[in-house]
Amino acid sequence: MTRWTNWAGTAAASPLRVHRPRGTEEIAEAIGRSAADGRRLRPLGSGHSFTAIAAADSDAMELTGWTGIASADVAKGLVTVRSGTTLKQLNAELDALGLAMTNLGDIDAQTVSGAISTGTHGTGARLGGIATQIAALELVLADGTVVTCSADERPDLFSAARVGLGALGVISTVTLQCEPSFLLSAQERPEPLEQVLEGFDQFADENDHFEFYWFPYGKNALVKRNNRLPAGSERRPLSKVKEFVDYEVTENLAFGGLCRLGRAVPKLVRPLGKFASNVLSARDYSDTSHRVFVTHRGVRFVESEFAVPRESLLDVFAELRALVPKLENPVMFPVEVRVAAADDIWLSTANGRDSAYIAIHQFLGMPYREYFAGFASIVGEVGGRPHWGKMHDLDAATLRSRYPRFDDFLRVRKEVDPAGVFTNTYLDRVLGTV
């Protein structure tokens, strides 16, 4: 038995049995064996969720042998990809076809099935998360049945499974609506936080992708504006030297060193935060879309993220700023703010409302519970919805009040997995027992 841990070390499990299927038939056979033995089964993904959503208390399933693009209609932009494919591999294979995802987050280590199942998103006031780019899903249900769902075929299952938490079945393939490859311009620079907040709505609306990072105790925010360039535009990527210095040396090696120093000597955290805010550098370049979206994260941390109604962002952020100086333990990591358009996916954090996302972090090994609990209390006042793959303490009773279609999701879950084959301790808390 191999002990499994997630990327941040916040969840661990020792599965009794690990299935490693290499196709849909083998996925169905593995589910059948687990169900027949009265065991629960969880697909593992890449372990990049901070919650225990993938922790298997009985059987687990690794899909690392079921990867790559299965088929593609380049003219229509429809690409069917096997569920164990990482976003990094998917981006490379789409590149070769002259295609791209419309929007991405800034991490590409997740499997495509794990990313959509937890509601992974990027930023863009007119754009939704990755799950909004799904045209169809193929799932293997608890009884071994292989089903396809889309807006036209089993639409309720489709509405539930696009952000399904792995609670409805094992996704075998995902059909994505892609588009021709495109370039993004990237403008990244420090700006006074007060100026960023004052112009937030304008900045979010006038850029294709807008986000900012605020270093607690500092006066500046690192602002990122990414916009599409016309077809035929010339790439102006960062030089290899600048890319290495800015991302690997400054954002990973140097920042990691500051974090370790702050963890060892907590009284230095506040001045270190001010220092980090003051030495942020500017970048201006353009590149293939996924090369702009994705950033290497080498410094490990813990994270909690909530989606709030976009119109409440400034009030919530003001309360968060007021909270930070009152904490017993200082905060070493920045706060990230993004936006997304409303969608109709039942358990999407942007269901039915334009949303702003606030993600708070703490360097791994530093105290975070008071900070995360205070943040959860603030966002709770405006109906904040936690990212399914990031840390929170909410249960089904509270989450039902924040998702209008919560009971519809539970109804579909009961239909496709009446015995609770795909549940675990985390799902028992956030969805209730089957």
Image (tube, grey):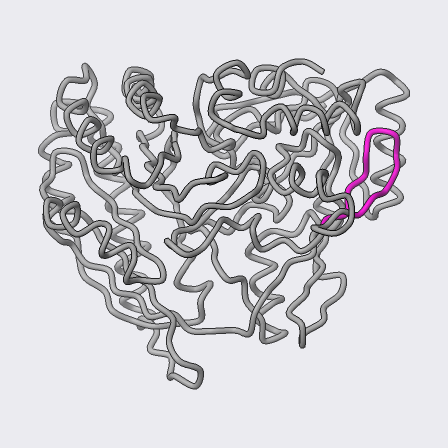
* Residue 20, image quadrant: top right
**In this image, 391 relative to 140: left or right?**
left
Quadrant showing the C terminus = top right
**In this image, 61 relative to 223: left or right?**
right
- Indicate the position of residue 341 as horizontal and vertical percent values: 43, 49
Magenta highlight on residue 56: no
**In this image, 35 relative to 90: left or right?**
right
- Indicate the position of residue 228 as horizontal and vertical percent values: 38, 71
Quadrant showing the N terminus = top right
Residue ID at (26%, 32%): 260
Residue range in magenta is 137-148
Residue ID at (21%, 49%): 200
Magenta highlight on residue 146: yes
* Residue 412, image quadrant: top right
Question: Of residues 349 and 173, which is closer to you in this image?
Answer: 349
Q: How many marks?
A: 0
- Indicate the position of residue 131 as horizontal and vertical percent values: 57, 48
* Residue 43, image quadrant: top right
Residue ID at (65%, 29%): 409
